[in-house]
Image (spheres, helix red, strand yellow):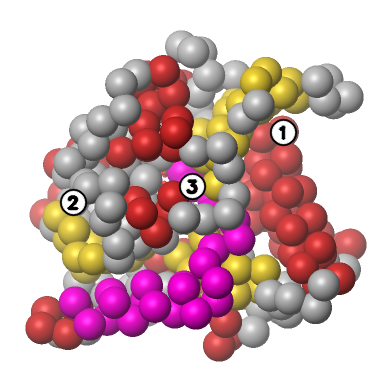
Amino acid sequence: MSNNPNRTSCARNLTLCANAEQASLYVAEQIAELIQEQQKLGKPAVLGLATGNTPKIVYQELIRMHQHEGLSFHNVVSFNLDEYYPIYPEDDQSYTYFMRKYLFGHIDIQPHNIHIPHADCPADAIAQYCKDYEDKIKAFGGLDLQLLGIGRNGHIGFNEPGSSFESTTRLVDLHPLTRKDAQNDFGTIDKVPHHAISIGIQTITQSKKILLLALGANKSTIISQALKGKISTEVPASILQTLPQVEYVLDRDAAALI
Ligand code: GLP
């Protein structure tokens, strides 16, 4: 049990927090600790990063730690999970734009250490591009920590229902629910891309540590399926049940049905 009254470690890999802020601060603390441990060893911290609403407070807290507590990101190497395809990095809806706005624009990460799938490459170059992305992760010895959100259909990254558990970085088709959930960002549904580049489920499951953060009541149904339901490619996040290095960090609303 943790000493923090706003946080309870329920099982080996489940941490329940009073609210979204507490859950996010807990995740940010773990990321900061990993970065600092690796700094002491003179090693890079290889982070898999997510976009969406879920990690925003985590990133805000990491920025605060950088600005007020001296947390440096000079040894951080980052790989983002995914990116819409096609999209230009400078488009407001791109994840390159998102990461700059919510994290990278405010910390001292070295620009050459930032990796986000570039979804402006021609269709016939994508397969090679995805292989190179995967190889780069391997060249750094794999991901030390993968931060995950979860889609309402159980997707992790943009690994939609039906994705193979052995999948690696590739071009994927977006599920109708995923496109609908992205509609607010793009304005109208017809502007939401039909495809994305996503690292694979195998790539994710090979991370040394995985933190799945879920916040809010609209994640409670899928969280209950992903944590307690059958392990099935129809709920991609269900594969995480089999992994000892996974920790689920949930606020009270997301945990309501477990
Ligand atoms: C997006 C991202 C995912 C993210 C998920 C949940 O489509 N590609 O990486 O985890 O959807 O988004 P949100 O955090 O906004 O609920």
Magenta segment includes 137: yes
Secondary structure type for disc 3? strand
* 159 or 38, nearer to the observer: 38
At x 44% / y 33%, what residue is drawn? Answer: 242
Residue that label 2 marks:
174
For disc 3, the marked residue is 148
Start-end of magenta stretch: 127-149
Circle 2 crowding by C-alpha within 10 Å: few under 14, some 14–19, many from 20: many
Which badge, 1 or 2, is on the more N-terminal residue?
Answer: 1
The dot on residue 22 is 1
Position in image of residue 177 (x %, y %): 20, 38
Counting residues from the start of the chain, the first of labels 2 and 3 encountered is 3
Amino acid under disc 2:
Leu
> Which amino acid type corresponds to the residue marked 1 in the rendered image?
Gln
Structural distance between the alpha carbons of marks 1 and 3? 17 Å
Q: Is residue 179 above or below residue 46?
A: above
Mark nearest the camera among 2 and 3 is: 3
